[in-house]
Amino acid sequence: MPVENSVKKYRDEKGFTQAGLGEAVSVSRQTINAIETGRYEPSLELGLKLAKQFGVSVEQLFVLT
């Protein structure tokens, strides 16, 4: 089941670079890029870290399509 995400939207709103966000949640810039482009679906743990970093719920960040 495909998952759409708003990581890039929230990253841009918060002023993070891909590298900066990756560092904040302990993953590489390449991982953030892969999530944003839909080539990688993060683990629940990483999804929760990203949501916490942006101050939103996981449901706001990731949506099943």
Image (cartoon, rainbow, N blue to C red):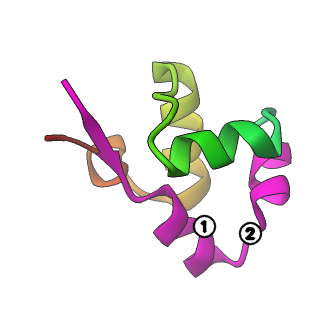
**From the viewer's perspective, is 3 left or right of 54?**
left
Could you tell me which residue is drawn at 57 percent across and 44 percent down?
50
**From the viewer's perspective, is 5 left or right of 17?**
left
Image position, residue 27 (x, y; %):
78, 33
Is 22 magenta? The answer is yes
Residue placed under numbered mark 2 in the picture: 16
Distance, label 1 to label 2, CA atoms, is: 5 Å
Q: Amino acid at mark 1?
A: Arg
Contact between marks 1 and 2 (CB within 8 A): the answer is: yes
Q: Which residues are magenta?
A: 1-24
Residue placed under numbered mark 1 in the picture: 11
Name the foreground residue: 36 vs 7. Answer: 36
**From the viewer's perspective, is 13 left or right of 41?**
right
Q: Amino acid at mark 2?
A: Phe
Image position, residue 42 (x, y; %):
51, 27
Name the foreground residue: 35 vs 50. Answer: 35
Q: Could you tell which of marks 1 and 2 lies nearer the N-terminus? A: 1
Element assignment for label 2: loop
